[in-house]
Image (cartoon, helix red, strand yellow):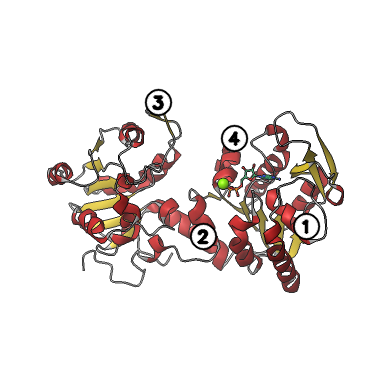
């Protein structure tokens, strides 16, 4: 990676501000999924073991610049405390006199969590004064919140410009995994794209078509491609205004000699609801009043055949309406297939909130080479955009002494 990391400065005795992504689901004041807290542990432990004063900060939910009691970070601090085996204090506010006092009393080897950054509208506005206040708390800045690196906020960009800024271990892992896909994947390199809409991912499609050898497209977005090829899709999810984009992408793939696989058969349902009548039909014969809800068995065989030679596979987006288990066969088959390929030494990278949720349901996340924690951020990375929260971190060839 061309960015400096926590390994590139001596944290001992220094005040280190760590931007983490503790945007976790809460229910009745308890954390229901602590994956993101666990993901930040390596960086936090590394710094504490080396006697840093660790100041953690995160957002949670969308409080829109106001204090929302149900979005306080206390349950997160409790869970983090359990994982670290020590008490973790949370301040009453991200800034203010109480916070300044609490921070002034901290000793090396101690950790504190600032209250939800987004209780202040200045956070998302990247307000310079707010950024300056946050920066005044620390000597060094570390970003371990890959999931928010595509946003230029006070805690991801503004304050990072004011301090020596480094990548945490999670950030490093994400950048390494995703950039090796874009820069030098082991070939053949295949992408499997699904999910709801072409519009969400048109730039990802465009960028990947220029990098991949093989492309499999399923999910709702495949419908727009089927229409681009002259098929009709009944009542299926369709973005008529993206048909031209789909045509252009198909033409580009053809010109580049990319193998582009679309569904040949699909599961259609009378309604996109649990228990609705459904059947498998050829993709060219979708009945007028039915909706495509999943990839058919012949499609899955074609996808697997096309992916078989790949040494690197990127998967983003479910292949059907997997939230309804009856329409999740394609998504589950892909998850199992990729887990098997990973066991054969193929590099398998999965990104996207819903795709990762599908993997988790099957307990297959651990099998993959890399599962990205950042939904929007990983998509923007795959579009080929330099994320502002990454750009601001110290380059590898910059002087290494922090504060220099
Ligand atoms: P990710 O979060 O992995 O990037 P998306 O958010 O793009 O994925 O898409 C996930 C959504 O796509 C799911 O809610 C799923 O129900 C929906 N989806 C998949 N296939 C279809 C389809 N054929 N018709 C409608 N929605 C679909
Ligand atoms: Mg999603």
Q: Nearer the viewer, residue 85 or 130?
A: 130
Number of the label disc, if any, that sits on residue 28: 3
- Measure the alpha-carbon separation of dots 4 and 3: 22 Å
> Within 10 angstroms of label 3, few (less than 14), some, or many (20 or more) residues?
few
- Residue sitting farthest toward the top: 28
Measured as percent of width and height from the top left, residue 343 is found at 63, 46
- The answer to whether mark 1 is within 8 Å of ligand 1 is no
Number of the label disc, if any, that sits on residue 361: 4
Q: Nearer the viewer, residue 8 or 143?
A: 143
Query: Label 2 near label 4: C-beta < 8 Å?
Result: no
> Within 10 angstroms of label 1, few (less than 14), some, or many (20 or more) residues?
many
- The answer to whether mark 3 is within 8 Å of ligand 2 is no
Measured as percent of width and height from the top left, residue 223 is found at 74, 52
Q: Label 1: which residue? A: 227
Q: Label 2: which residue? A: 380
Q: Nearer the viewer, mark 1 or mark 3?
A: 1
Ranked by sequence position, the earlier of labels 2 and 3 is: 3
Number of dots carrying numbers: 4
Ranked by sequence position, the earlier of labels 1 and 2 is: 1
Q: Nearer the viewer, mark 1 or mark 2?
A: 1
Q: Nearer the viewer, mark 4 or mark 3?
A: 3
Q: Quadrant of ligand 1?
A: top right
Q: Nearer the viewer, residue 392 or 274?
A: 274
- Measure the alpha-carbon separation of dots 1 and 3: 46 Å
- Measure the alpha-carbon separation of dots 4 and 2: 25 Å
Ranked by sequence position, the earlier of labels 4 and 2 is: 4
């Amino acid at each position: 990676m061309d960015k400096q990391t926590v390994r590139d400065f001596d944290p001992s005795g220094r005040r280190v501000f760590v931007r983490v992504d503790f945007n976790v689901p809460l229910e009745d004041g308890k954390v229901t999924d602590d994956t993101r807290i666990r993901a930040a542990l390596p960086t936090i432990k590394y710094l504490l073991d080396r006697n840093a004063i660790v100041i953690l900060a995160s957002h949670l939910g969308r409080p829109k610049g106001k204090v929302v009691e149900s979005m306080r970070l206390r349950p997160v601090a409790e869970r983090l405390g359990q994982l670290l085996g020590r008490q973790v204090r949370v301040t009453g506010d991200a800034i203010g006199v109480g916070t300044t006092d609490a921070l002034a009393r901290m000793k090396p080897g101690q950790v504190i969590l600032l209250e939800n950054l987004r209780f202040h509208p200045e956070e998302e506005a990247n307000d310079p004064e707010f950024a300056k206040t946050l920066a005044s708390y620390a000597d060094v800045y570390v970003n371990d919140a890959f999931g928010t690196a595509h946003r230029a906020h006070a805690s991801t960009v503004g304050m990072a410009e004011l301090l020596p800024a480094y990548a945490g271990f999670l950030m490093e892992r994400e950048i390494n995994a995703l950039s090796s896909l874009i820069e030098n994947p082991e070939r053949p390199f295949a992408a499997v794209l699904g999910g709801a809409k072409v519009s969400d991912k048109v730039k990802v499609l465009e960028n990947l078509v220029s990098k991949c050898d093989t492309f499999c497209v399923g999910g709702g977005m495949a419908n727009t491609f089927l229409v681009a090829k002259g098929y009709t899709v009944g009542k299926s999810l369709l973005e008529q205004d993206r048909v031209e984009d789909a045509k252009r992408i198909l033409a580009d793939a053809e010109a580049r000699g990319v193998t582009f696989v679309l569904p040949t058969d699909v599961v259609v349902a009378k309604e996109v609801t649990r228990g609705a009548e459904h059947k498998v039909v050829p993709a060219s014969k979708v009945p007028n009043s039915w909706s495509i809800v999943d990839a058919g068995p012949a499609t899955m065989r074609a996808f697997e055949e096309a992916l078989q030679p790949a040494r690197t596979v990127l998967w983003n987006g479910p292949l059907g309406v997997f939230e309804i288990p009856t329409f999740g066969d394609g998504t589950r088959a892909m998850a199992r297939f990729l887990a098997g390929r990973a066991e054969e030494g193929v590099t398998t990278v999965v990104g996207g909130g819903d795709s990762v949720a599908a993997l988790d349901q099957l307990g297959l996340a651990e099998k993959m080479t890399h599962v990205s924690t950042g939904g929007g951020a990983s998509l923007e990375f795959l579009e080929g955009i330099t994320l502002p929260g990454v750009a601001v971190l110290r380059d590898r060839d910059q002087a290494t002494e922090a504060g220099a």
